[in-house]
Image: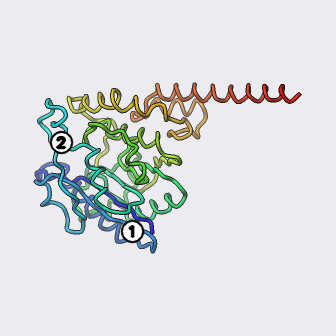
Amino acid sequence: MLKVVHIINPVNVAKNNQLFAAQLITFESMRVAISQAKISDFEIIQCCTQYPEDVEIVPSYFHKLSNLTRSVSDINSELKVRKLPLIKDILSKTTEIEKIDFIIYTNVDIALMPFFYKAVYEYIMEGHDFIAINRRRLENKYTSVNELTKMYAELGKSHPGFDCFIFKQSLLKKLHLDGICVGVPFLEVSLLHNLLAVAEKPKIIFDKHLSFHIGMNVLGFNKDSYYQHNKSIYFNKIYPNIKSKFDLNKFPYSEKSFLNRMMSWMLNPSIFTVDYLNLEGKSSLQKVKLKLDEIRWRILQR
C-alpha cells in the first residue's frame, strides 16, 4: 500500500480577499480529485495545519492536524504585519500521521484536476522520489466553485514557478528550510533546490494539465521586507548547506542542448544562472578527468 499525505495551509481571509474564492475552489477540486483516485494499493490522506483562528473554514473532509504555534515574526521581529507560517513547521506536522510513504505540499490557491492523484501515483511508480508539477494559469474570470467544470475545460497557459512538491517522506529530515515563510517568493526556490539536492530520481513537470491557478501573473510580486527575509535566509543559511549536493543531471532542462539549457536557466526566475555555470564547469571537469584517467589506465596496461 502506497500511503500519501497531501498537506495544505488554509487561511481565514475576508470574502473580498482574492484568496477567499481561490481556497474554496482548491478545497472542492481536492475533494473531487480524491473521489476519482480509486486505486487499490493507493491511500491518500488530505490534511491541513493552520492557526486556531483558521480552523472554522476547513472543510469536514480534511484531516485536521494540530494547529501552528508560531509565525515568521517569532524569528524576525521586524515582520509583524502578516502572520505567515514557516514551511518547516507545516511539513513537520505530517509526522503526526504514521507510516507515510510520500508527502504532497501545494500552495492553498492551487487547484487540482480530477485525475491529479492518478497521475501522481503513476509518476511514483516510475521510481521518482521527488516530483514537481507546475500549474496552468487561468483568467481571473472564474470566481465560483460552480464554475469548476469550466475551469477543468480551460487549457490555460504554463507557468515557470514551482508550487506543487511531491517527495518521499524519508527526504523530509534532510531538508534545510530554516526560517523560510510561505506566501512569499523564495519559498519555491528553497523547496526546489533542497529536494533536487537530496533526491535520487527527481522529475520536473512544466507543461502537463494537472493543476491550475486563477490569475495570469508570472513574475508579479512585491520585493518587500518579507521577500528580503526569505531571500536572505535562502542565500545565507540554506544555500551554503546544499550547494555541494547539486548535480547538473538532476536540474531542470538538463536534457536540453548546452545553449538551450543555458537560455532556459537564465529565463526561469526560480533557478539561478550562477548555479548553472558552476554545474556546467563541474560537469566539464568531470568529463576531462574521466578521459585523462582512461589515458592513464591505457598507458599502465602497456
Question: Residue 255's x, y, as percent?
Answer: 58, 40
Residue 193 versus residue 293: which sits nearer the camera? 293
Which residue is the site of mark 1?
43
Q: Residue at x 48, y 52 (%)?
A: 129
Of the numbered discs 1 and 2, the one sitting upstream in the chain is: 1
Question: Is 46 situated left or right of 83 in this image?
Answer: right
Q: In the drawing, what numbered circle is on residue 71?
A: 2
- Residue 193 sits in quarter: top left
Q: Residue at x 50, y 62 (%)?
A: 122
- Residue 178 sits in quarter: top left
Question: Is 202 situated left or right of 217 in this image?
Answer: right
Q: Amino acid at mark 2?
A: Ser
The N terminus: image quadrant = bottom left
Question: Residue 74's x, y, as percent?
Answer: 16, 37
The C terminus: image quadrant = top right
Q: Residues within 10 Å of mark 2 (few under 14, many from 20)?
A: many
Q: What secondary structure is found at the residue carrying circle 1?
A: strand
Q: What secondary structure is found at the residue carrying circle 2?
A: loop
Position of residue 61 relative to residue 16, above or below, is below
Q: Residue at x 21, y 44 (%)?
A: 85
